[in-house]
Amino acid sequence: MAEPATSLYPFGVEGGDQEYVQRMVDFNSPLFKPEIGFPFGKSLQDALYVNNGQIIFPPTDNHVPSNPNPPPQGFTGQESLPMVAAFWDDADFSKGVGTTWYQEYSTLNSTQDPVVQDVEAKIEKYLKIPYVAKWTLKVTWEKAPAYPSQRDDTQTSTYQAVLTTDGNCSFVLLLYQDGGMRWDYTRLAAANVLIGFSRCCTSATGFWDSRDLLQHCVETVGSVTPRRAQLPLLEHSCPI
């Protein structure tokens, strides 16, 4: 029997999130500043942006990343900035379709929030390690349309990235809405959808990407859906 799909965490107004969207093809979120930093590879990152299915860690608060398409060859470990790709390709919010939602959870003194408790439980279940979160960020791309979008676009994708850290180790959960990943792969301007991470400027151990994962991801003809969408994709990073 197939394992049931993992649901997205509650999002939007009902989930207590804040909405941020600009009606343009590419845009960055406000700058997030994890209060205890976010360990990523051998570095402690102290800021991040969110954009087209990416989470980017800039070198300074004043550095505003551009929004290029994902590289056709995938990650190499030699990217200019460390990043996580939740579902990176050329989205287009300019026609009034789709939005993004954010919520930060600071749990330095308490982990009573049910979302944070469930994140901790998933980490313990899948990685078999104890974990108590101190900072968590939930990002949801709701009905994100592929470029070029139309005003009545229904071929959209809904997915989440959850970043969490205890100040020593960090984790990223990637969740994809069951039945909600509807981009038509045959009509994408550049069919280079990327899922994974790059710690930037490191050896081959500093990255992982989804080229093998997405090679067999066609759930229905032409539809881009991560093959293991029924389980959360989970990456973790601890200083060496």
Image: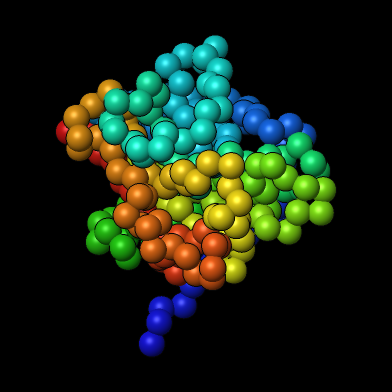
For residue 36, what is the image quadrant? Answer: top left
Q: Is residue 127 left or right of residue 116?
A: left
Q: Is residue 137 left or right of residue 12?
A: left
**Image point 60% across, 56% down: which residue?**
183
Against 221, residue 59 (above or below) is above
Q: Is residue 199 left or right of residue 68?
A: left
Q: So how many labels did they put on this image?
A: 0
Q: Where's the C terminus, which quadrant?
A: top left
Residue at the far front: name it.
186
Instruction: Pick whichever, 60 or 95, lies toward us.
Output: 95
Q: Where's the N terminus, which quadrant?
A: bottom left
User: How far across and down, in percent of the image, does residue 60 sit?
Assistant: 47, 14
Residue at the far bottom: name it.
1
**Image point 35% across, 26% down: which residue?**
79
Against 119, residue 77 (above or below) is above
Q: Is residue 107 visible?
A: no
